[in-house]
């Protein structure tokens, strides 16, 4: 789930357990990403993010998912019991085996360079490391129309779990998704 420059594997396969238990549902709430009546947070400029019309002609901005540099939260593969296990995510046992083979002794992906905070195999990373609408639909049953909201929500949950709710990584991600241009 702009991320080509980040060179870290996107967080599509390890979302919090709540997502694993609700794979075919939409966003947690209708106003999950709405900041105020106009739908903007104070630091957002007016020419970015997607807008849609809601009842009474109100416009609601939606975030545009993108990976950010120097995060790598998704590369922490062994996140603990609040996240779904590979067995809960994958149907194919070979995917489970491959995923488990990527977990280093410290819980991080063996291809994640902690010094540079980049994936050393980014161009050739596994399909489940790609944040794309088709992958989200295959792994989680998430409709392509809900991809951006679910990808953003998934990343936010993962970043909070790995880096913390007050981390620079979370601030950087929120800034990026709310100030993204229309390209993805």
Image (spheres, rainbow, N blue to C red):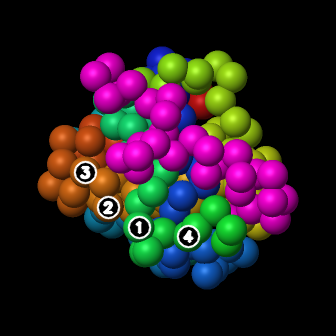
**Residue beneath label 3, please?**
163
Residue 20 against residue 2 in the figure, above or below: below
**Residue 95 pos. (x, y %):** 76, 51
How busy is the neighbourhood of tag 1: few (under 14 within 10 Å), some, or many (20 plus)? few
What element does badge 4 sit on? loop
Count every numbered label the image shows and give the total: 4
Which span is picked out in magenta? Answer: 89-117
Determine which of the numbered discs, if any, sits on residue 84 in the image. 4
**Residue beneath label 2, please?**
161
Kindly identify the residue that appears in the image at 58 percent across and 68 percent down: 85
Determine which of the numbered discs, if any, sits on residue 80 in the image. 1
Residue 164 against residue 66 in the figure, above or below: below
What element does badge 3 sit on? helix
| Residue 173 visible (yes or no) | yes
**Residue 152 pos. (x, y %):** 48, 53
Q: Is residue 25 left or right of residue 38?
A: right
Q: Earlier in the sequence, mark 3 or mark 1?
A: 1
| Residue 155 visible (yes or no) | no
Q: Which one is in front, 42 or 149?
A: 149
Q: Which one is in front, 119 or 28?
A: 119
Q: Nearer the viewer, mark 3 or mark 1?
A: 1
**Residue contact at pointers 1 and 4, CB within 8 angstroms:** no
| Separation of residues labelled 3 and 2 (CA atoms) | 6 Å
């Amino acid at each position: 789930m702009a991320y080509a420059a980040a060179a870290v594997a996107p967080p599509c396969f390890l979302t919090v357990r709540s997502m694993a238990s609700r794979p075919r549902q939409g966003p947690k709430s209708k106003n999950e990403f709405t900041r105020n009546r106009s739908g903007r947070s104070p630091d957002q400029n007016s020419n970015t993010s997607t807008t849609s019309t809601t009842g009474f002609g109100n416009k609601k901005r939606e975030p545009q998912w993108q990976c950010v540099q120097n995060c790598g939260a998704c590369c922490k593969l062994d996140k603990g019991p609040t996240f779904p296990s590979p067995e809960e995510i994958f149907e194919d046992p070979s995917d489970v085996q491959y995923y488990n083979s990527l977990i280093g002794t410290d819980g991080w992906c063996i291809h994640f360079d902690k010094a540079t905070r980049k994936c050393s195999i980014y161009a050739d990373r596994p399909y489940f490391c790609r944040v794309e609408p088709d992958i989200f639909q295959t792994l989680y049953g998430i409709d392509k129309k809900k991809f951006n909201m679910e990808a953003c929500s998934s990343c936010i949950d993962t970043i909070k779990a790995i880096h913390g709710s007050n981390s620079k990584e979370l601030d950087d991600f929120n800034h990026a998704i709310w100030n993204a241009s229309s390209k993805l």
